[in-house]
Image (tube, rainbow, N blue to C red):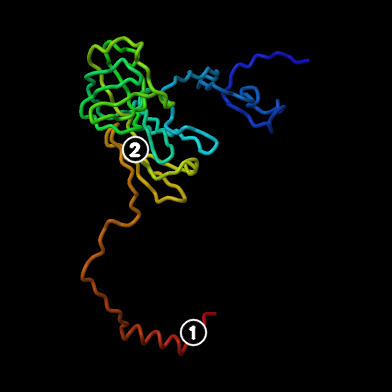
């Protein structure tokens, strides 16, 4: 029958199945076969991993025909960490549990209608953009949510949920004032969804170098949190060769004489 034992530490982490039953192994008594959703403290104990929270659905709707997006980390310092969503020819960025957005536009009106229409003068948005709405007075059910939009004019747009269904605001409280709309910042990339899993990357300060066998090497650089660039990394030298340099090859008479003498009368050392 099974015998209950006290496991006092997990300092050795997980052990290979090849070591199952190796009670003579020194680390056997301070290891686990499987440690999931937990981390090992430097003191030896195992602690439950912190839970996750929903931030935003990925821009890629995963279907059997598509590969899922990938999340990679961009760690500038101990206090500046960024999660990057890499999908089919795009990147999105997340900081402090929220997506990075562009500069916001002030909202001046929101209709109680189906679909809901928002007025934000001179916003420049286009159909299909994802926007975040914050700080609305009155129609508070819109606050803190992300929507897809269909543009009606340069100043107004219709709201839709991320699944494409229109937002019905007829039962929402009336709009009073305030509020902002900000587009989710998205960086265009050349990487197709099928190639994302094979990306390799290395970071140096605010620049991440990315490589793939089917693409030239790229440098991803953070200018600001909502301003990133992706440029082909230079692989040629940036130093120009010197100009007007000439060279003439010659052999001195002494060197030539010695060379001929050695060829005609070689010496043997014994």
Q: Is residue 166 above or below residue 205?
A: above
Q: Which element type, helix, strand or loop, lies under badge 1?
A: loop
In the displayed orientation, state which residue is furthest to the front. 114
Task: Tell me where residue 99 sits by quadrant.
Answer: top left
In the displayed orientation, state which residue is furthest to the right. 1
Q: Residue 117: x, y in percent?
A: 30, 22
**Which residue does the numbered mark 1 point to in the structure image?**
267
The residue at 32%/82% (across/down) is 251
Q: Residue 90: x, y in percent?
A: 39, 38
User: How far apart are labels 2 and 1 at the CA level?
Assistant: 74 Å
The residue at 23%/16% (across/down) is 178
| Any part of residue 78 in sight | no
Q: Are marks 2 and 1 in contact (CB under 8 Å)?
A: no
**Which residue does the numbered mark 2 point to in the structure image?**
187
Identify which residue, 74 or 101, lies in the foreground: 101
How would you rate the neighbour count of disc 2 (Cα within 10 Å): few for under 14, some for 14-19, many for 20 or more? some
User: On the picture, is 73 further left or further right than 140?
Assistant: right
Q: Which element type, helix, strand or loop, lies under badge 2?
A: strand
Identify which residue, 251 or 210, lies in the foreground: 210
Task: Tell me where residue 28 sits by quadrant.
Answer: top right
Q: Residue 215: x, y in percent?
A: 42, 50
The residue at 33%/43% (across/down) is 230
In the displayed orientation, state which residue is furthest to the bottom. 264
Identify which residue, 101 or 23, lies in the foreground: 101
* Chain-order first, disc 2 or disc 1: 2
How would you rate the neighbour count of disc 1 (Cα within 10 Å): few for under 14, some for 14-19, many for 20 or more? few
| Quadrant of the frame with the C terminus | bottom right
| Quadrant of the frame with the N terminus | top right
The dot on residue 27 is none
């Amino acid at each position: 029958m099974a015998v209950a034992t006290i496991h006092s530490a997990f300092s050795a982490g997980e052990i290979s199945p090849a070591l199952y039953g190796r009670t003579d192994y020194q680390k056997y008594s301070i290891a686990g076969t499987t440690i999931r959703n937990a981390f090992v403290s430097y003191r030896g104990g195992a602690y439950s991993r912190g839970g996750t929270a929903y931030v935003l659905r990925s821009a890629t709707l995963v279907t059997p025909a598509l590969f899922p997006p990938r999340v990679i980390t961009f760690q500038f310092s101990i206090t500046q960490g960024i999660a990057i969503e890499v999908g089919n020819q795009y990147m999105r960025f997340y900081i402090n549990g929220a997506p990075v957005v562009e500069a916001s536009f002030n909202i001046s009106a929101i209709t109680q209608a189906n679909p809901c229409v928002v007025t934000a003068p001179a916003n420049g948005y286009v159909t299909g953009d994802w926007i975040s709405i914050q700080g609305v007075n009155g129609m508070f059910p819109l606050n803190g949510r992300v929507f897809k939009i269909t543009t009606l004019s340069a100043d107004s747009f219709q709201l839709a949920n991320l699944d494409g269904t229109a937002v019905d605001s007829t039962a929402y409280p009336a709009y009073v004032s305030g509020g902002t709309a900000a587009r989710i910042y998205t960086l265009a990339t050349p990487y197709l969804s099928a190639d994302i899993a094979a990306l390799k990357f290395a970071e140096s300060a605010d620049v991440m170098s990315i490589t793939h066998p089917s693409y030239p090497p790229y440098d991803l650089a953070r200018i600001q949190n909502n301003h990133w660039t992706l440029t082909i990394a230079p692989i040629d030298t940036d130093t120009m060769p010197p100009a007007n340099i000439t060279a003439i090859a010659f052999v001195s008479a002494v060197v030539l004489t010695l060379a001929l003498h050695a060829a005609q009368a070689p010496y043997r050392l014994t």
